[in-house]
Image (cartoon, grey):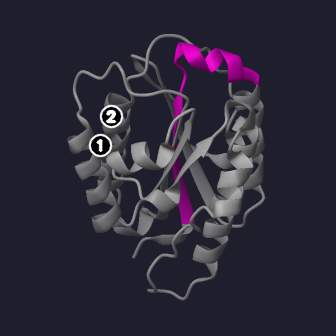
Amino acid sequence: MTRADLTHLYFLLDRSGSMQSIKADTEGGFTAFIDEQRKVPGECRVTLAQFDNAYEVVYSDRPVADVPRLVLEPRGSTALLDAMGRLITTAGKDLAALAEDERPGTVIVAVMTDGYENASQEWTHPAIKALVEQQTADYAWQFLYMGADQDAIEVGTSLGVSAGASVTYGRGKTSAALSMNAGKIAKLRSDRAMAPAGSPPPMMDAYSDAERAELAE
């Protein structure tokens, strides 16, 4: 069995040039997001990857207590599909290499972007959608899609992320979006820790209409 007390959080963060206007909010919001996870019982490990038209792993498999402050350096365009493909396939290979009793019982992939895909060369929307749906169905991975200045439900579902786990946020609500998701992930981790052994993993709470309104402009 996998470890019910272990969560691996994969966070994919847009650092394209348009993020410059919300750089400070993103940095502060991400720090608060990590601080919230430090309060939750159980072990949490974090992988952070950033993307523009290039992809960079900032750190991998790091204990949440050791996660450094985020420094965001916006640049370039938005190769979202290629970044998602790299992150998900690499994570899958790394987890498959572990013994089952060393694998995290909860795997969360959170994507945060303020723009539309415009630069990918390797992956297409249908391919990413199939990949996300496969990891969700076969391994119970949970995906979150946070998109600014777009219909995040439409974009998220085109990527295989459920409508209930996709949310639009206004550019001025970046910190609020991160705070809301920090709470959802913290609750999920607590629910998993308290679930009876062998029971299906709990699901993250879907966004309510009130929550969506709170994050809108």
In this rendering, position of residue 140 left or right of residue 205: left
Asked if the residues shown at circle 2 and circle 1 are in contact, with their CB atoms under 8 angstroms apart, the answer is yes
Question: Which quadrant does the N terminus fall into?
Answer: bottom left
Q: Foreground: 126 or 143?
A: 126
Percent from the top left, x then y, of residue 27?
A: 72, 28
Question: Which quadrant does the C terminus fall into?
Answer: top right
Percent from the top left, x then y, of residue 28?
A: 78, 32
Is 22 part of what is drawn in magenta? yes
- The residue depicted at 29 percent of the width and 43 percent of the height is 89
Q: Foreground: 45 or 153?
A: 153
Q: Foreground: 11 or 175?
A: 175
- The residue depicted at 53 percent of the width and 11 percent of the height is 75
Label 2 secondary element: helix
Residue 86, quarter of the rendered image = top left
- The residue depicted at 49 percent of the width and 44 percent of the height is 152
Is 87 part of what is drawn in magenta? no
Q: Is residue 19 above or below residue 37?
A: above
Residue type, mark 1 in image: Thr
Crowd rating for badge 2 (residues with CA inside 10 Å; few <14, some 14–19, many 20+):
some
Q: What's the magenta region?
A: 6-24
Q: Foreground: 185 or 172?
A: 172
In this rendering, position of residue 56 left or right of residue 171: left
In this rendering, position of residue 55 left or right of residue 208: left
Task: Read off the residue under disc 1.
Answer: 89
Residue type, mark 2 in image: Arg
Measured in 3D between alpha carbons, the distance from the residue under mark 2 to the one under mark 1, in whole angstroms, is 6 Å
Q: Is residue 34 visible?
A: no
| Number of numbered discs on residues | 2
- The residue depicted at 70 percent of the width and 46 percent of the height is 215
Percent from the top left, x then y, of residue 14?
A: 52, 27
Task: Read off the residue under disc 2.
Answer: 86
